[in-house]
Image (cartoon, grey):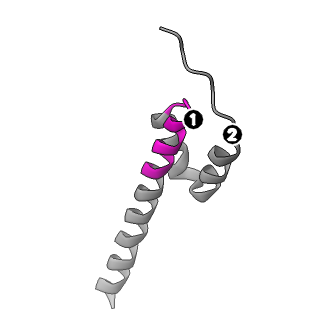
């Protein structure tokens, strides 16, 4: 019983981490800070995905 709870908890953290990585890549594809959105995603999860999806792509930095 206790091992089931630990297993479910670890699955939750793997899912949250995976979503955060996906949001990181999605943010970078829109020229936004992937690291910032990774940490935001850890707190607000799927809501961050929705926010990133509706944001416009920023212009590329000339360099």
Q: Is residue 3 left or right of residue 22?
A: left
Identify the residue under disc 1: 30
The crowding category of the residue bearing disc 1, from other C-alpha atoms within 10 Å (few below 14, some 14 to 19, many at least 20), is some
Locate the N terminus and report the quarter of the image it occupies: bottom left
- Which residues lie in the magenta part? 21-33
Label 2 sits on a secondary structure element that is loop
Q: Nearer the viewer, residue 40 or 27?
A: 27
Q: Nearer the viewer, residue 14 or 32?
A: 32
Q: Are marks 1 and 2 in contact (CB under 8 Å)?
A: yes
Any magenta on residue 47? no
* Residue 26: image location, x then y, percent: 52, 44
Identify the residue under disc 2: 55
* Residue 13: image location, x then y, percent: 40, 63
Q: Residue at x 59, y 58 (%)?
A: 46
Quarter residue 14 falls in: bottom left
Label 1 sits on a secondary structure element that is loop
């Amino acid at each position: 019983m206790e091992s089931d709870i630990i297993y479910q908890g670890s699955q939750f953290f793997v899912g949250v981490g995976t979503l955060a990585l996906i949001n990181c890549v999605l943010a970078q594809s829109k020229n936004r800070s992937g690291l910032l959105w990774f940490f935001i995603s850890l707190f607000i999860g799927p809501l961050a995905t929705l926010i990133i999806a509706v944001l416009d792509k920023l212009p590329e930095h000339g360099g």
